[in-house]
Amino acid sequence: MLLLGIPALLFALITWQVVEDGPLLRVDERVSRALIHPDRVSAALSDLGNIEIAVPVLVVALLWSARQARRSGTDRWWLPSAAAAVLMALVPVLVVPLKELTDRPGTAVSPGTGYYPSGHTATAAVAYGAATLLVLPWLRSTRTRRALVLGYGLVVLGVSFGLVRRGWHWPLDVVGSWCLCTVLLVGFRLLPARHSRR
């Protein structure tokens, strides 16, 4: 429950600060000014959060995981893959209304409003995170499992850094997405575990 409660609480706190134009936004603006330096690397990193890149990776993991589960004779072999697909579909359902409700202005590089929480960060975190959670149970080597989890973390951090460095998002937009997606991924991870005990 702690894994759900802490990120949910942090997400609520950050969202409140964004809506109320709280003191955290001053810190956010200072950090953003120090980090913004658009370049090709930051643009390439942030592109890993595009739907066109992240979702196909998830689809491959969905299909491969379902195939492995079916081959092994697992009951309801389709459930984890179906749950991951639903989880990915939830990202725009949650993020788009939040962007409209918070109506956060963009940075000097990205004029306009509707930047909180970061959709690219959420897409990367959920697509690559769900893919990782689907593939992990089928990997035998501890080293390979660790490498996959590390790779996931590096990709999400890379996307997040690229978005902030490029000036497409404030740091709190990214951190808010991390918190929201942690709740979603922990919920996803708990679902098959609860189902398997029945």
Image: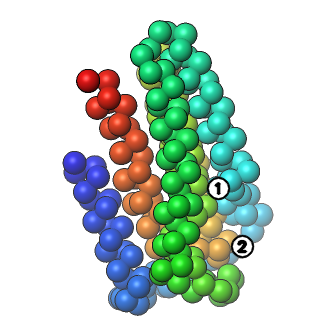
Query: Badge 1: how crowded within 10 Å, few (<14), some, or many (20+)?
Result: many
Q: Is residue 73 above or below residue 89?
A: above
Q: CA distance from mark 1 to mark 2?
A: 17 Å
Q: Is residue 21 above or below residue 28?
A: below
Of tags 1 and 2, which is closer to the observer?
1
Which residue appears at 55% of the width and 24% of the height? 65
Give the percent coordinates (x, y) of residue 120. 61, 61
| Three-letter code, disc 1 | Gly
Marks 1,2: beta carbons within 8 A: no
Which residue appears at 31% of the width and 61% of the height? 8
**Residue at the extreme right of the image, as rendered:** 40
Question: Disc 1 designates what residue?
Answer: 49
| Three-letter code, disc 2 | Pro
Instruction: In this rendered view, identify the residue nearer to me: 92 or 24.
Output: 92
Q: Quadrant of residue 119?
A: bottom right
Q: How is the image coloured?
A: rainbow
Q: Secondary structure at mark 2?
A: loop
Give the percent coordinates (x, y) of residue 79. 46, 29
Residue 38: mark in rendering = 2
Q: Secondary structure at mark 1?
A: loop
Which residue appears at 55% of the width and 41% of the height? 85
